[in-house]
C-alpha cells in the first residue's frame, strides 16, 4: 500500500534495447538423440528468444544427424548470442546463420520453402473458382469429394499466406503448415 | 580382462566407472530407486560414501570438494524428491562453472511416465540446470555414458551433469567398458588454445596502455593452479593493477603490490574507479556479470577491452569487447606471458614511467579508504569480526566458505586470500545454505586443514541439518555466524529501496546456536564482547570438533561501499558519506523505476 509513495527500485540494471530486431533463419545440425529438440526449444524459452518457425527432421540416417531450421527474430547482438548459446549444447555440431551467409553471398535471404495442406469446402459453383485459384498458385489437389478439396502447396511463406487469405472466404476448413526448410544458394554446404 | 570379467550388473558398473574416473568420495542419500547402487557401495572399500541429511547438502558438499581440489565432485541421489532436491546445487554449479557429476536413481523403465511412486522427469527438470544429462535405458551404454559425463563435466567450461539410471538398469547385467574405450560425442570438442594472432594483438594493445587494469575471475581458478601462477607472472611483468570478481579471489594474492581489491557492487573504490577510468581492460576468465558492471551504458566508457574466455557465449554477451580470445585461460596466459617477454624489456616495478600517473590516481582512490567502518568497543562490528578471524587464522592451512548475504561480502572484503581454491562461495546463483555443506566437502578433501564457513544467522539455518553429517564423520568444520538477527542484505535493500519498511527480514525466534550445536553433538561458542572476541576465536580454532560460533554483531550495520542500482562505477556510495539520509536517497527516481 506504500508502493505509490516510494517507487520500488531494483537489484538489477536494465539497459534499453535501441537496436532494431531482424528476422534470421538458422540451421542447426544436431545428433539425433532423445531430448535434443527439448534442449534447443528450452534454450529459446529459457533465455527469452523468439521462435517464429521451427522444423526438424533426420537428414543423415547413418550418422544419426538431424537438421533443425529455426526462424527467429532479434537484434544483431541477440542473434549472435543465440548462435553461441546453441553451440554450447553438447549434441549440437554446427550452427549457421543462413541469413548472414546469404547476405555475404549477395542475397537478401536464403532459399526458404514451406509446405502447407489446406482443406477447403467446395460445393456447387464455387468449385470451379477454387480450382482456378489453386491452379494459379500451383497448388495440387491431393484429396477431394463433392464437398471438399485438400490442396498441397509449396513455396515461400508469403505465398502460402496469400493463398490462405484468398481461399478463406471460399470456405477454409483447416490449414497445416510445416514451417520453413531453408538452405543457401551456391555450391557450398552449411 | 576377459569378456566374463567385463560382465557385471549396472550397479557394479556405476562403482567401477566411478573408480576408473579417479573418484574417491561421493556424497549421497539412499532411497528406493538407488538401493542396488547402495548395495554395491556396502560391498567395496575403494570409494568412500558420505551420508548427508538432505540432497541439497550433498550437492554443495560435492561443489566444495570440487572447488578446493580441482577434481570433479560426485553426488548420488534417489529418484523423485532426491532428484528435485539436487536442483539447487546443480544450478549453483552451472552458474559458477563447478564440475559436478550427479547420479540419480529412476523408477524402472517400464514404469517411466506412469506417475509411479517417487517418479519425476529428472532429465526434463535438470535439463536447463546442467551442462548435459542422460537417461540410461540400456545397461550396455551405462559405462560409456558415465565416462562421457566426467569428460563433459570437467572439460571446456566446467559444469554439472546428471546421469539418471532406472532401477531395472541397475539390476541388469551388461558389459563394462573402460574410459579409454568409451564413445566420445564428437559434437562436443571444446577449444582450449587461443588464436595466437589475437593474443599478439592483445599484447600490442597492452603495451600501449597508459591506464590499464586486469579484471580476473573464477575462470582463472577453474583453469588450475598453473593459470594462477601465470596470472601473477603477467601482473609482475606488466606492472598492471589487478582486481578480481568474487569468484576469482585468491588467484592473485591479496597481499600483492598490484592488488586493488574486489570490484563490483560491494567492491573497493579503487577497483571500481580503475575499471571506470581505464584505457585498456584485460578481462581474464570473468563474464561481465551484472554485479560487476553496474549501469551497462556507463561501464568503462573509454577503454579497449580484451576478453579471454573458454565459453564463446560469454564473449559479447553483455559488454562488447574489442579483442575476444577464445580458449582456456591457462593456455592463453602462457602465450601472453611468452609474447610479452619477447616484445618488452625487463619488467619495471609497477610498469615504470608509462604507468606512473595511473598508479598515482590509484593511490588517491585508495586513500579514500572505502572499506572503513566505525569501530566500537561496546558491540562487535561485523567487519571487525572478519578482520580478527583473518588475523587469527592466516598462516594456517585455511579454507573459507560462505553463505550468501552481507557476511559474504564482508568476508570477500576483509579476508585476505593468498592462494586459489581456498575460497568457496556461491557467486552466480547466490544460494543461501551453500556455505556449510560446501565446508564439509572441503573438510572431507582436506581433513587436516582449518575449514571455516563464514555464515549469517539466516543462511545457516537453510542447511543446518548437515551438523549431523559433520558430527558423524568427525569433520571439525567451523561455522562462524555473524549474527545480527536480520537477513542483513535484505534489510539493507529494504532500507535503501523500500523506505526502511523491514518486511519479514527480522528473525523473531532465533534458535540458541550454542544449544543447537550441543544438541547435534558439536561445540557451541557465543561471543558478544569485542574484548573477548580473540580468545573466543582461538578457542574455536583449537577445538577439534564441529563448532557453531555465534558471533553477536551490530544489528544494523550496512555493507559499504556500494554501487546503488542505476549507477555507474564512479558513483559509488562510500561508507563515510553513507548517512541515513544519503542511504535513503542513494537511488534516484530513475534508478527506482528499473523493474
Image: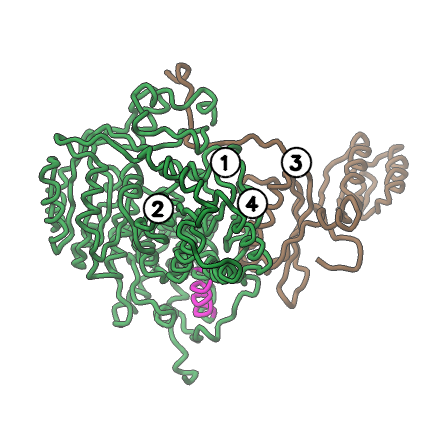
Q: Nearer the viewer, residue B47 or A84?
A: A84
Q: Where is mark 1, residue-wise?
A: B299
Report whether residue B115 is seen. no
Classify A108 as above or below B137: above
A82 sits left or right of B153 in the view: right
B272 falls in the magenta region? no
**Real-space CA distance between mark 3 and mark 2, rounded to the nearest whole angstrom:** 35 Å
Establish whether labels 4 and 1 are both on one chain. Answer: yes
Residue furthest to the top = A5
Residue drawn at (67%, 44%) of the image: A71
Mark 3 surroundings within 10 Å by alpha-carbon count, few (fewer than 14), some (14 through 19), many (20 or more):
some
**Real-space CA distance between mark 4 and mark 1, rounded to the nearest whole angstrom:** 12 Å
Which corner quadrant of the image does residue B462 belong to? top left
Which numbered disc, 4 or 1, marks the residue that appears first in the sequence? Answer: 1
Q: Which residues are magenta?
A: B141-153
Which numbered disc, 2 or 1, marks the residue that appears first in the sequence? Answer: 1
Q: Which mark is residue A21?
A: 3
B455 sits left or right of B79 in the view: left
Classify B443 as above or below B403: below
- Quadrant containing the N terminus of chain A is top left
Mark 1 surroundings within 10 Å by alpha-carbon count, few (fewer than 14), some (14 through 19), many (20 or more):
many
Q: Tell me which chain the residue with mark 1 is part of.
A: B
**Real-space CA distance between mark 2 and mark 1, rounded to the nearest whole angstrom:** 24 Å
Residue drawn at (49%, 61%) of the image: B341
Q: Secondary structure at mark 2?
A: loop
Amino acid at each position: 500500500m506504500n508502493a505509490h509513495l516510494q517507487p520500488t527500485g531494483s537489484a538489477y540494471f536494465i539497459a534499453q534495447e535501441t537496436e532494431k530486431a531482424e528476422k534470421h533463419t538458422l540451421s542447426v545440425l544436431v545428433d539425433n538423440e532423445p531430448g535434443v529438440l527439448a534442449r534447443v526449444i528450452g534454450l529459446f524459452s529459457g533465455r527469452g528468444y523468439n521462435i517464429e518457425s521451427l522444423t526438424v527432421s533426420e537428414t543423415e540416417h547413418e550418422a544419426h544427424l538431424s537438421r533443425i531450421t529455426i526462424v527467429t527474430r532479434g537484434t544483431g547482438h541477440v542473434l549472435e548470442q543465440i548462435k553461441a548459446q546453441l553451440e554450447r549444447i553438447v549434441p549440437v555440431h554446427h550452427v549457421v546463420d543462413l541469413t548472414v551467409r546469404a547476405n555475404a553471398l549477395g542475397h537478401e535471404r536464403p532459399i526458404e520453402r514451406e509446405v502447407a495442406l489446406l482443406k477447403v469446402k467446395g460445393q456447387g459453383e464455387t468449385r470451379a473458382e477454387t480450382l482456378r485459384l489453386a491452379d494459379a498458385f500451383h497448388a495440387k489437389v491431393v484429396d477431394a469429394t463433392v464437398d471438399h478439396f485438400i490442396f498441397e502447396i509449396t513455396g515461400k511463406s508469403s505465398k502460402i499466406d496469400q493463398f490462405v487469405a484468398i481461399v478463406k472466404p471460399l470456405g477454409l476448413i483447416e490449414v497445416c503448415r510445416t514451417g520453413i526448410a531453408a538452405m543457401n544458394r551456391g555450391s557450398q554446404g552449411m | 580382462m576377459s569378456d566374463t570379467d567385463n560382465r557385471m550388473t549396472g550397479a557394479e558398473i556405476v562403482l567401477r566407472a566411478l573408480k576408473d574416473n579417479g573418484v574417491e568420495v561421493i556424497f549421497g542419500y539412499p532411497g528406493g530407486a538407488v538401493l542396488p547402487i547402495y548395495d554395491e557401495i556396502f560391498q567395496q572399500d575403494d570409494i568412500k560414501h558420505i551420508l548427508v541429511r538432505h540432497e541439497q547438502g550433498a550437492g554443495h558438499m560435492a561443489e566444495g570438494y570440487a572447488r578446493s581440489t580441482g577434481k570433479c565432485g560426485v553426488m548420488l541421489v534417489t529418484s523423485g524428491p532426491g532428484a528435485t532436491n539436487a536442483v539447487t546445487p546443480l544450478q549453483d554449479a552451472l552458474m559458477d562453472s563447478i564440475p559436478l557429476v550427479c547420479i540419480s536413481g529412476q523408477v524402472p523403465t517400464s514404469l517411466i511416465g506412469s506417475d509411479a511412486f517417487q517418479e519425476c522427469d529428472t532429465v526434463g527438470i535438470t535439463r536447463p540446470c546442467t551442462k548435459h544429462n542422460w537417461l540410461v535405458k540400456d545397461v550396455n551404454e551405462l559405462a560409456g555414458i558415465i565416462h562421457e559425463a566426467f569428460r563433459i563435466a570437467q572439460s571446456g567450461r566446467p559444469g554439472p551433469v546428471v546421469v539418471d539410471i532406472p532401477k531395472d538398469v541397475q539390476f541388469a547385467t551388461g558389459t563394462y567398458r573402460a574410459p579409454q574405450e568409451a564413445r566420445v560425442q564428437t559434437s562436443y570438442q571444446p577449444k582450449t588454445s587461443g588464436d595466437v594472432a589475437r593474443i599478439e594483438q592483445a599484447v600490442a594493445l597492452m603495451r600501449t596502455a597508459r591506464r590499464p587494469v586486469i579484471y580476473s575471475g573464477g575462470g582463472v581458478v577453474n583453469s588450475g593452479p598453473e593459470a594462477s601462477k601465470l596470472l601473477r607472472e603477467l601482473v609482475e611483468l606488466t606492472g598492471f593493477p589487478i582486481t578480481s570478481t568474487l569468484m576469482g579471489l585468491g588467484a592473485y594474492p591479496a597481499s600483492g603490490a598490484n592488488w586493488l581489491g574486489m570490484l563490483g557492487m560491494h567492491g573497493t573504490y579503487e577497483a571500481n574507479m580503475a575499471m571506470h577510468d581505464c584505457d585498456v581492460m584485460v578481462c581474464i576468465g570473468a563474464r561481465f556479470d551484472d554485479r560487476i558492471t553496474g549501469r551497462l551504458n556507463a561501464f568503462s566508457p573509454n577503454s579497449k577491452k580484451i576478453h579471454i574466455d573458454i565459453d564463446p557465449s560469454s564473449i559479447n554477451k553483455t559488454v562488447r569487447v574489442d579483442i575476444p580470445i577464445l580458449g582456456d585461460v591457462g593456455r592463453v596466459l602462457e602465450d601472453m606471458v611468452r609474447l610479452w617477454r619477447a616484445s618488452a624489456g625487463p619488467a619495471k616495478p609497477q610498469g615504470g614511467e608509462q604507468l606512473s600517473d595511473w598508479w598515482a590516481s590509484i593511490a588517491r582512490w585508495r586513500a579514500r579508504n572505502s572499506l572503513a567502518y566505525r569501530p566500537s568497543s561496546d558491540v562487535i562490528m561485523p567487519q571487525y569480526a572478519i578482520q580478527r578471524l583473518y588475523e587469527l587464522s592466516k598462516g594456517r592451512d585455511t579454507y573459507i566458505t560462505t553463505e550468501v548475504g552481507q557476511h559474504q561480502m564482508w568476508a570477500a572484503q576483509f579476508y585476505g586470500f593468498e592462494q586459489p581454491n581456498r575460497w568457496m562461495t556461491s557467486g552466480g546463483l547466490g544460494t543461501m545454505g551453500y556455505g556449510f555443506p560446501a565446508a564439509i566437502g572441503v573438510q572431507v578433501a582436506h581433513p587436516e586443514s582449518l575449514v571455516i564457513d563464514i555464515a549469517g544467522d539466516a543462511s545457516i539455518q537453510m542447511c543446518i541439518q548437515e551438523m549431523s553429517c559433520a558430527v558423524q564423520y568427525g569433520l571439525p568444520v567451523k561455522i562462524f555466524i555473524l549474527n545480527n538477527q536480520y537477513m542483513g542484505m535484505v534489510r539493507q535493500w529494504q532500507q535503501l529501496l523500500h523506505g526502511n519498511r523491514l518486511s519479514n527480514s527480522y528473525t523473531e525466534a532465533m534458535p540458541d546456536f550454542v544449544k543447537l550445536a550441543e544438541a547435534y553433538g558439536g561445540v557451541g561458542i557465543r561471543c558478544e564482547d569485542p574484548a573477548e572476541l580473540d580468545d573466543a576465536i582461538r578457542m574455536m580454532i583449537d577445538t577439534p570438533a564441529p563448532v557453531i560460533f555465534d558471533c553477536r554483531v551490530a544489528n544494523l550495520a550496512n555493507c559499504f561501499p556500494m554501487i546503488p542500482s542505476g549507477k555507474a562505477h564512479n558513483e559509488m556510495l562510500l561508507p563515510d558519506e553513507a548517512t541515513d539520509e544519503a542511504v535513503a536517497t542513494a537511488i534516484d527516481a530513475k534508478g527506482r523505476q528499473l523493474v
